[in-house]
Amino acid sequence: MLVSITKANITLANYKMAEDQILTIGANGDRILVEYLSRSNGKPEVIIFQHTEDKILAWHNCQAAKSNYANACWHLAISDILYNSGPCQIDLIGEPDQFWATKDLTQEFMPRPGKFQTVELSIEGPDPIPTEIDIPEKHKSLRRFRLPKTLLDKVIAFRERQEQRLTGEQKLRIPQNVNYIPQNAEVTYAVSALLYDTWSPPLLMGPKGSGKSTLVEALAEILHLPICRISGGIDINADYLLGCKTLIPEETAPAKLIAKIGVNCAKVGEPLTVEELRQLSGGNATMRVAHEPGVLLEAITNGELILIDEINVLIPEVTSILHTLLDWQRTITVSGLGEVKAHPDFRLVAAMNVGYMGTRPLNNAFRDRFRGIQVQGVSRETLMELLQERVAEDTARKLADIYEALYESVYSPTGATLSENCISLRSLLRAAEEISMGIASQKEIIISCLTESLESASERTQVKDLIEMRL
């Protein structure tokens, strides 16, 4: 894709440099990595340039992509600072597999060394970053998760194995086209933990509405595994997880065999009675004791992915079961069955909200079995992207402003004025959905979606006032 850079873009790029918005300019072979502060969330982002004989290539992704770079963007105009290229066209390329610089060029353009945060600096770094990762056609959907090349190779090998072994019913339970947009490296960290030689279960931690459940669905899609869910609570016990004994009928004799028995008995002068025929055909079938597996045991034996949501609400009886399952042997003892070894492709992911009512700290030995991963709230760019799938850009911007104001009121470091009940990404997306349906005015829909589920009358009033101020 070709993007045109204008004089206005170049002017803004130079202004941003003077404001110290550009953190790092590093080199890796013939590629230049630029790390800059995102306007929307204040976090570092990376853009990578490569200057060939006849064109400039760049890997970049920002909010301007939603409009196909109709007005370009100042990030791409950094090319003028690097190459003195002036207004030009830049060819956007696929994402590289790593962000690694072997030389700090920052002082050639700015009066200080680089402030390396996302970009790694190593004089003895790897070979220059490839322009694009080659992914087989049937795995192209993986590109949007931004996995490094070495990890991507492991993922593809794992997916190929699942394609061969899973049944048709299991494949129907594999999530497809999950709309999860990585915020940092949380997807990479979680996938790598699940593909260690002795895998570790990721423990996803973050506030309500940060996308933990959606991330787990994305992990199931990446690994091509059917997903099962367990939500923590006092009603979750060993029987629910592992199953229990039950009575099932013995298999009855086939009809042809019954007929043959009847004929032979008649030949010897002892024809079968009506009661005997009923017993043979299952009328009074003999019952036997069998084990009916629970949801966890089925996932373990069938090699599926299971999500343990709100793991810090589970009762000790359940955490002790998981504790034995998550050591290196991957075995579990089931009453009546003995020791059961997990299928080699079985995987487990846990998620939890910290500090909510009813939660309890995890035992240190139990927690140590997990690979902890923080899942942050969505950035403004991601929020705009999600909202613009449902409503026009102007409406999406208003909704994003309201969400940011609520977030500040709930999580302000100088003192929260609202509780966490007052902020919900799901409610915001519901509002966007209803606005797209045109069932009422924008103002009425937004106030209804964001306030009517709140139990506190004073908080309903505060949120309503906040919404009206921004509309």
Image: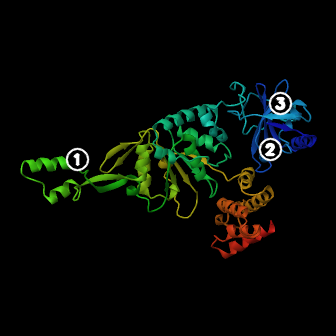
What numbered label is drawn on residue 256?
1
Question: 275 and 325: which one is in front?
Answer: 275
Q: Residues within 10 Å of mark 2 (few under 14, many from 20)?
A: few
Check the picture and name the quadrant holding the C terminus: bottom right
Quadrant assignment for the N terminus = top right
The mark nearer the N terminus, 3 or 1, is 3
Q: Residue furthest bottom?
A: 457
Residue 9, quarter of picture:
top right
Q: CA distance from mark 2 to mark 1?
A: 70 Å
Q: Is residue 361 visible?
A: no
Q: Residues within 10 Å of mark 1 (few under 14, many from 20)?
A: few
Q: Which residue is most to the left? A: 269
Residue type beneath disc 2 = Asn
How far apart marks 3 and 1 lie (CA) works out to 78 Å
Residue at point 69% right, 26% down?
125
Q: Position of residue 369 (x, y in %)?
A: 49, 45
Residue type, mark 3 in image: Ile
* Mark 3 element type: strand
Q: Nearer the viewer, mark 2 or mark 1?
A: 1
Relative to residue 429, is residue 324 drawn left or right?
left
Q: Amino acid at mark 1?
A: Lys
Q: Which residue is mark 3?
A: 56
Can you tell which quarter of the image residue 419 is in?
A: bottom right
In this rendering, position of residue 225 left or right of residue 98: left
- Where residue 127 sits, quadrant-wise, is top right
- Residue 68: mark in rendering: 2
Q: Position of residue 222 (x, y in %)?
A: 58, 41
> Closer to us: mark 3 or mark 1?
1
